[in-house]
Every structure is written in structure tokens, then in C-alpha cells.
Image (cartoon, rainbow, N blue to C red):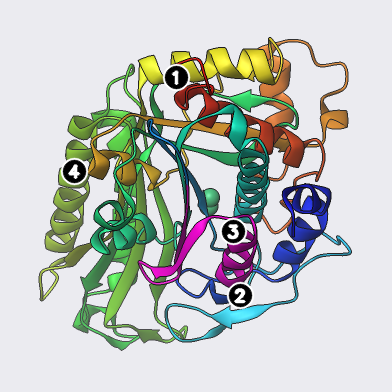
Amino acid sequence: MSPADVLADLANIYRDLHEHPELAFAEHRTAGIIAEHLTALGYETATGVGGTGVVGVLRNGPGPTALLRADMDALPVQEETGLDYASTARGTARDGSETPVMHACGHDVHVTCLLGAAATLAAERDTWRGTVQLVFQPAEEVGGGAQAMIDDQIFDRFGRPDVVLGQHVGPLPAGLVGLRRGPAFAGADMLHVVMHGRGGHGSRPETTVDPVVMAAATVMRLQTVVSREVAGGESAVVTVGALHAGNAGNVIPERAEMRVSLRSYDPDVRNRLMTSIERIVRAEAAASGAPEEPEVNLQESFPVLVNDPDACARTQAGFDRDLGPGLTVDPGKVTGSEDVGLLATAAGVPLVYWLLGGADPAAFAGVSDRDGLQRVVRELPSNHSAQFAPVIEPTLTTGVKALVSAARTWLPAEGRG
Ligand SMILES: [Zn+2]
Ligand SMILES: [Zn+2]
């Protein structure tokens, strides 16, 4: 396909990707479609980078290198949007079970917009110089994809960029972008906790150590970590998202398991959360007389995403020019997490990562202030919801423009030096 054909076909590319989502590190079909388009557009293309990742490079004379990144993976969610291009796909979850799969986080939007940007930059190559490096990353949702590409020597093989740029679609009005300077997306850690009791008959609790009561007390006590141990001016989230013990009413089980998710914006706060959680888990086990120490294991970890303030200012000036003045807003800190920052940290270069509005602008009719905007945003299906359904336009057009604008901020115009 020519660049013009790709741009004309973007909505179809998006609907096709949406209908065929793939889980982390299983993005084989998606990677194949990306590689085919990039090759046709004249990019040097490599597949299988860090597992299922794809890298496309367009060398266009001497000058800086702008890295543009999109993530490709979907989630184990049963889609309930009712769209005519809704997913009915199934995949294999990490525990080996079969699961429905959905692009509930909009990574299909990211891939489509980056293909659109690839086409635009290729079509306009006589107006800029330098190198464009496109990174289609696997497995953002499980936190391993960026690191896998780094471990696969992405920068030794394809060159070291001067900046890392990217976007995440979310429930802002489509047509807007959200850019936050400094700490922008939370650091996230996922803990797996196992508490050991002593099982027995439900009628004779005195012969047991009940892990259900132990876990219940722990869950309640964990609610005090943020409310009592984090200062008013700091922010953090602790959520016990999974709690499993036993399977019969008259049997006291042997153990209880919990999955706990932490969000923070500051390494000191993060360390305090980790220490407090472990302390409470151990203390509640001791208070119950547990026969064995509990296990607390860190399963996933995303660092805080920090946008470079100077690079943000440069990028925003480009957005004001190319998207229109007033279309870039400060969305505040996002409690979601991202591993794109690892690419910038590994390359030792600034990161600029923005939110791309994907919500139907009609939902915001009559809203004129920030409070109103946030009220509507709270009511819309969020990322990871089975109802998450970005509007195709103006989301795709804005996403392509934003990527091209950001890249061109770093790539000198031909002839201008
Ligand atoms: Zn997500
Ligand atoms: Zn995401």
C-alpha cells in the first residue's frame, strides 16, 4: 500500500485490529500486519524483537533520531461494547486457561495511529531529515514488553534515539491530547501474598488457625496504609484486587492468597508502601498464630513515568501549531501505569508521553470547565472496562497528527539546518 492508501484505510485497519486482539507476547497476527505495512512504506523492518516486537526505521539523511512507540497487546476481557467490529477472540491466559480477549486498553488505537504516522512521515520525507525509529512493543499490560526489547539490544541493533515519544488513548474528549510534565503515570507494583493457616472441620475452629479470618483482618488493616501512613500531600493507592481461600462452608482451609496492587509517584512513598504491607501481613499472621511465615512476592513492577519538562514544552509548542491552540490540556497525574519509560531510561534520553482523547465528544456537550470535564470522564467506561469503546474519529486523525507533530519537533525541516 502507498502512504495515501494506508491513510485512507486507517479506520479499516483499526476495526480489523480491534476484532482480532492478541494477548501479551502472542501478538503474532498484529506484528505481521504491522511489518507488511512498514515494508511497503519503505521502512527497514525487523520482527521478533523482544519476542513479538516490530521495529521500523526510516533513515532520511543526517540528523537526530525520534523514537515513536506503540504497544500492541490486548487484555483477557470479554468484550461487551456491542460494536459490529467487537472481538469474539479467545486466547490462553498466563495460568494456561482459555480466556476471551479484548482490546480494552486501546492498544489497537496506538498501533493504527503509529501506522498512520509512518505513512505520513514517509510521504513527507522531502520536508524533514534525520531518522524515524518506530517501536511496536509487545506485552505492555504484563509489564515485560519494553524490558524484553531492551534485553534484545534494540538500541545496539537499530540505533540510539534522541527522544522517546508515544501516546495512550483514554477517556478524554476525542480531538484533545493531555500532556503532563514531570511524574505523569503512576509507578505500579503487583504483590502476591500467601497466608498459611491450619485447616480443619468448620465445626471445630479451636483445632485450626483460620486463614480466612487472618486474610480478612489483613485486608482491612491494609486500608490504613494510605489513610494513616501516607501524608496528605502525597498520593498512593493500595488495592487488594483478588482474595481466594477455601471452597466449602464447613471446611476451614489451609491457606489464603491475595493479589495486591500499589500505585505511587515517588520512590520513597513506594518503598514505604512495600515495607508497610509486608509488616502488616507478617503481623496479622503472627496475631493469628500462623504455623508458618506468610509469603510476599513482587510479581510485576512498573516505574513511575516521568515526562521531561523541557521536551514537553517543545512538544506542546508543536501540538499548539499542528493540532490547534487550546487542544492540549493538563490531565493531572494518571494512576494508570506504563512501561514506555524504560525505553527512555535505557537510552538515557527524554520521554514525552501524552494521553490521546478517545471519548465521544458528544458526551461532553455543554461542559466548559475542568470540574465538568472530570465529572463526565468519571462516568465513561474506563480503560480495561468491557465497555471501553473509543470513537474512531476524530481519535485516529488526532493521534496520527500528534505523533507526526511530536516527531517533527525533533527532526529538522529540510534545508533549515
Ligand atoms: Zn492497560
Ligand atoms: Zn494500555
Amino acid carrying mark 2 in the image: Arg
Q: Which residue is mark 1?
A: 312
First in sequence: mark 3 vs mark 2: 2
First in sequence: mark 3 vs mark 4: 3
Residue 212, image quadrant: bottom left
Categorize mark 1 by other alpha carbons within 10 Å: few (<14), some (14-19), many (20+): many
Label 4 CB less than 8 angstroms from ligand 1:
no
Could you tell whether 30 is left or right of 281 in the image?
Answer: right
Could you tell whether 377 is left or right of 199 in the image?
Answer: right
Q: Which residue is mark 2?
A: 29
First in sequence: mark 1 vs mark 3: 3
> Is-magenta flag for residue 42?
yes
**Front-most of 266 and 305?**
305
- Name the residue located 33 percent from the left edge and 29 percent from the top edge: 350
Q: Which residue is mark 4?
A: 276
Q: CA distance from mark 3 to mark 4?
A: 48 Å
Nearer to us: label 2 or label 4? 2
Residue 284, image quadrant: bottom left
Q: CA distance from mark 1 to mark 3?
A: 28 Å
Q: CA distance from mark 2 to mark 4?
A: 43 Å
- Name the residue located 58 percent from the left edge and 62 percent from the top edge: 39
Find the magenta span and give its range: 29-58
Q: Which residue is mark 3?
A: 38
**Front-most of 207 and 188?**
188
Residue 132: image location, x then y, percent: 47, 42
Categorize mark 3 by other alpha carbons within 10 Å: few (<14), some (14-19), many (20+): many
Amino acid carrying mark 4 in the image: Ser
Residue 157: image location, x then y, percent: 29, 58
Residue 388: image location, x then y, percent: 71, 51
